[in-house]
Image (cartoon, rainbow, N blue to C red):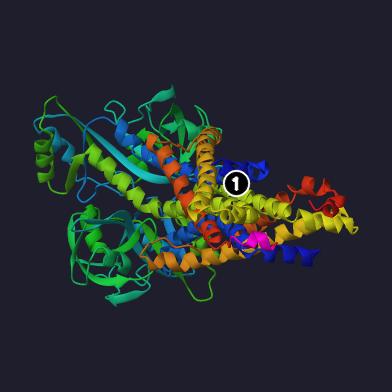
Amino acid sequence: MSLARRNLFQDKTRLGLSIGGVALAIMLILVLKGFLAGMNRQITSYLDHSPGSIIVAQEDVVNLLGATSLLPEGIDQKAETIRGVDEVIPILSQFVILDLHGKKQPAYMVGYEPEQGGGPWRLIAGREPRSKKEMVFDRVLAERHGLNLGDQVEVMGRDFTIVGLSSGTTSWMTSFFFVRKQDAEDLLLAPGATSFLLLTTSDGADLDKILRRLNDFSGVNALTKKEMASNDLKLFAKVFSAPLKLMVGIAFLVGTMIVGLIIYTATIERQREYGVIKAIGAKNRFLYQVVLTQALFASIAGSSLGILLANGAAQWIMSARPQFLIVFEPVDSGQALLAGLGMALLASIFPTRVMAGLAPAEVFRK
Amino acid sequence: MIRLAFRNLFQNKARLVISVGGVALALLLILSLDAVFTGVERQITAYIEYSGADIWVSQVDVFNMHMASSSLPDTVARKVKYVPGVASVSPILYLTNNVVAGDERNLAYIIGLPENAEFGGPWSISSGRSLPAEGEAILNRNIAEKSGIALGDEVEILGKEFKVTGFSEGTASLVNSVAFISMDDFEEMRGSYDTVSFLLVKVSDGESPEVVADHIQSQVRDVTAQTRNNFAAQERRVVKDMSTDLITIMNLIGFLIGLAVMALTVYTSTLSRRQEYGMLKALGARNTDLYLTVLAQAILSVILGFLFGLALTLLLTVVVPIFGSNLVLEVSRASLLKVGSVSLVIAAVSAMLPIRQIAGLDPAMVFRGR
């Protein structure tokens, strides 16, 4: 143990660099995972905060984001007649691409009736839209583009005035903005159109029964908001999991290479000393332990520093670019330490082979 | 000194492999992320690029297809057709929705094509029909295979059953695929018969698409007319503008990791060559000569790391699609230039670390046997 420690600490710069390298690799893994977790939270933010527990979409539409839904006419009146349904809130929603200061910004437009609900859940300034061509804009997006209450934003060729700023309505990919449903219908050239119905139910109502009744109507798909949120998560996980896994895999290999380099160099430099130890009777097992202890120390110290760095980097990224939400789950730190352990084990393979091939007599020949 | 750097570098093969490998992987991080986004840009513009249209006409101030909605009264098609220089006009209907087969749901651009559509249909068919008749759908082959759909099987789109009569190639992306159905089915499902999403325009021989697009823009009210290239460029801008911040953050982390690996390599290798450098000093070499040796060594390692990282990225561009992923990686020239410059900065910065070691080296040390 003390031999391993002395080997490692003999050159502090080298140790510092290797711990720093591993820390950066672990930080990258954690930031990527935190980024995905944050994105998942942002993806479901509308469903998490909008009123009601049931959502009615067009037949075969199971997602809020990603799919276009257009409900058959009169479905809202039919839904209201179902026992246990308290309120039926229609919304017309659609992704649009805004051009803000020469930058393309995808945004999710929600057309809603302010007196019924389905709009922004946290207004931090201003009010909800009352008349034509008024909008509630996302605070973060507004800040990024220097927009404020009273400013105009062009949506599909029409100028809307920002009358309110909402919070919790942003994500890396897109932000939500809210207009009156009538305005959304005009923009989409779809008079009277409704994308989704948000249904609130009375206390103690049988949700399954209500869902069955709704699904008996032709051309609709009724599901709980939780189900739809989970479908949206699955959809985006499908898109992002492959690139994310690729990045995490590369980061892991980089970390392993760094630990490998430091342990290999430390082993080669001490080859003569290890030969002496072997010559005086030490078994290979003892030398392997020395190598492994060094690898474990470098990688665990690196992983721990990586966890701290990841937290610091996340705070920095979120303050510099508020559209990113980076969330760390408690299990992430444990996984980072396990990744460090994996790096140590893999990085020890090559130096232990060098050690195994070491002839004890070598030392006496020099 | 360059020769010395070369020999220093290649003398210890294991260290060389680890350091070059470490830098290569760090650069791979930057290269592969760039390649992912370039691939996505290529994929999401594929339908536009291969549509066969010279000009795309959309709702006024709608400049994109992806994550956008366009609606035009069908009377606009006639107006566009009368614009000088227009050879033919083909309308399409478009929305994003799921193609359902059993428990499998795949997000797709659903394109409604008129009968005998001249363009806007699938551009490469691996089997079956090339245009959908009523009640028929043409799906992407890859997606269909993954979902266990064969020709003749039924799928559900917007609640209606369709018989799969053709498989297309090159119509899938990381995000979605393209499914083609007839315009009549599309209208029936949407319950709307008097609007189209886009008009695909072919210009007459010898006419410039830019000039004809300008004519359409000035002569037809409430439309946006863009050449195919401009429309595709607008789509690429969406991906670029969305990903810029993310790529910058990842590039910074990749750069720091590359720097740490390179600094570690240069530092350990200089340290292990202390005696040789002391000998050179004793023989009259100046500090500057030794710095240049270290710098040359760092540059050589980084060049090798860059080449190796590039080779790995190119390998990934081949391997990833083999595993059935719709993730396509494409290395762009801009990315190569960026990573090349980053590599040189890494080499220069990492070579500064051993300066203190070299400057403080005592030439007499070698004679004392230290």
Q: Is residue B152 above or below residue B244?
A: below
Residue name at image x 62 percent, y 45 percent: A7
In the image, residue A207 lies in the stretch drawn in magenta: no
Residue name at image x 31 percent, y 30 percent: A49
Q: Give the side of residue A134 with respect to residue B146, left or right.
A: right
Which residue is nearer to you in this view: B295 or B242?
A: B295
Q: Of all residues shown, which one is farthest toward the right?
A: B284
Subunit that carries the residue with mark 1: A
Q: Is residue B103 above or below residue B49?
A: above
Q: Magenta region's main secondary structure? A: helix
Does residue B317 show up? yes
Q: Give the side of residue A39 with respect to residue B102, left or right.
A: right
Q: Give the side of residue A110 with respect to residue B191, left or right.
A: right
State the image coordinates of residue B325 (x, y, percent, origin top left): 37, 62
Which residue is nearer to you in this view: B30 or B169?
A: B30
Q: Of all residues shown, which one is farthest toward the front?
A: A280
Residue for badge 1: A18
Q: Is residue B80 above or below residue A305?
A: below
Residue name at image x 71 percent, y 54 percent: B272
| 10 Å crowding of disc 1: few (<14), some (14-19), many (20+) | many
Q: Is residue B149 above or below residue B94?
A: below
Which residue is nearer to you in this view: A264 or B265?
A: A264
State the image coordinates of residue B112 (x, y, percent, origin top left): 29, 62
State the image coordinates of residue A132 (x, y, percent, origin top left): 38, 32
Q: In the picture, which quadrant includes the N terminus of chain B?
A: bottom right
Give the total number of marks visible in the rendering.
1
Q: Which residues are magenta?
A: A360-365
In the image, residue A363 lies in the stretch drawn in magenta: yes
Residue name at image x 54 percent, y 46 percent: A294
State the image coordinates of residue B43 (x, y, percent, origin top left): 43, 62
Kind of residue at disc 1:
Ser
